[in-house]
Image: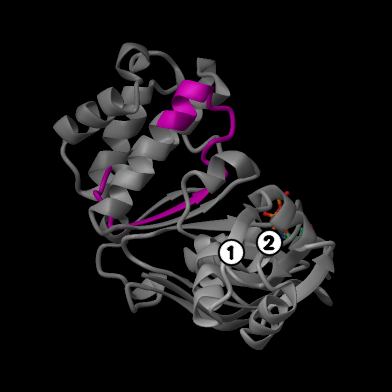
Amino acid sequence: MIQAFDLTKAYRRRRAVDGVTFSAAPGRVTGFLGLNGSGKTTTLRMLLGLTRPTSGHALINNRRFGDLPHPLRQVGAVLEQGISHPGQSGRAHLVCQAIVAGASRSRADALLESVGLADAADQRTGDYSLGMRQRLAVATALLGDPPVLILDEPANGLDPEGIVWLRRLLRDHARRGGTVLISSHQLAELAQLIDDVVIIAGGRVRCAAPLAALYGATARLRVRGRDPHRLGQAFRSAGARVTADGHCLEVIGLSAQDAGEVAFAARVPIYELTADVPSLERIFLDLAAAQ
Ligand SMILES: Nc1ncnc2c1ncn2[C@@H]1O[C@H](COP(=O)(O)OP(=O)(O)OP(=O)(O)O)[C@@H](O)[C@H]1O
């Protein structure tokens, strides 16, 4: 579990992060989205005890990062590239890090295999491509087999096969009860991976919700039924915004399932019900723009 409570970071007078509160739950993948400069990296660094908050605090599994007894066994992080010495081989880097994390050499070898770097293990990391460095960073994060993963743009530089691999890895981690917090600009990819979403803009959280609820709340339904007037009233009573378009109604604020239930309760037969669900990209841009 990751919890941020009113996290604030000011540089000189400017607040890069301003009262950020959210949580990322075990068993779920949480996407952390924001435009460039919105405060994502600063927030993630505060979660990991790398940047001291001006105010507020963060907990990982109910403790501040600095109070975790075995931090590398509790949290794995991918924060930036260039974590390894360019003259060191991938294997040497991972074996050194395994010693720090209290993991075995055989775990390092197994991870090289599972991230697809076995054949390149003895190459200098300075000669690695961006995608290979990302794979090595993910392997490093997994060394201590931590339940919590915090990943800043881990898909950067990964080819399509690498993205599918990462998606599987993170979903499996969550399925086993792990907590995953991931920032990414690749929204279409992210939409296939995440359960919950936190959107940050100008250092503030604009939205924190399950992705399904966000889609439901922003979906535009087109409904045609026997009695548009009565149907419109029933939808409005259920809290939706309704506009009439000829014999059809446009409904915002209800999921297709809820709209069906409302129509059933109002005893109005439905002839047609289609949902126009906006993409995560559209939702994100609308929320990020509403500063
Ligand atoms: N050490 C620092 N000193 C001064 N300002 C900083 C520092 N670190 C970050 N900032 C500022 O804080 C704001 C948020 O930066 P941050 O790196 O957290 O954004 P981000 O959402 O991760 O952006 P990106 O997607 O481009 O990586 C930016 O305006 C940045 O210039």
Secondary structure under the numbered disc 1 in the rendered image: strand
Q: Please name whichever residue, 280 or 236, is drawn nearer the observer in this view of the structure.
A: 236
Magenta residue check for 211? no
Q: Residues within 10 Å of mark 2 (few under 14, many from 20)?
A: many
Query: Which residue is labeled 2 in the image?
Result: 224
The residue at label 1 has a CB less than 8 Å from ligand 1: no
Query: Which residue is labeled 1 in the image?
Result: 270
> For the N terminus, which image quadrant?
bottom left
Relative to 147, residue 102 above or below: above
Residue found 48% across the figure and 52% down from its top: 194
45 with respect to 166 (left or right): right
Residue 154 point in image, percent of width and height: 52, 40
Residue 60 point in image, percent of width and height: 38, 71
Residue found 50% across the figure and 81% down from its top: 265
Question: Disc 1 vs disc 2: Cβ atoms closer than 8 Å?
Answer: yes
Residues in magenta, as a range? 143-164
Q: Please name whichever residue, 219 or 134, is drawn nearer the observer in this view of the structure.
A: 219
Q: Please name whichever residue, 206 or 21, is drawn nearer the observer in this view of the structure.
A: 206
Q: Give the quarter the ligand 1 occupies.
A: bottom right
Q: CA distance from mark 1 to mark 2?
A: 6 Å
Q: Quadrant of residue 112?
A: top left
Residue 49 point in image, percent of width and height: 48, 67
Question: As shown in the figure, which amino acid type bears the numbered disc 1?
Answer: Ile
Secondary structure under the numbered disc 2 in the rendered image: strand
> For the C terminus, which image quadrant?
bottom right
Task: Pick out the residue farthest to the front.
Answer: 226
Question: As shown in the figure, which amino acid type bears the numbered disc 2?
Answer: Arg
Sequence-wise, which precedes: disc 1 or disc 2? 2
Residue found 52% across the figure and 20% down from its top: 126
Q: Quadrant of residue 216?
A: bottom right
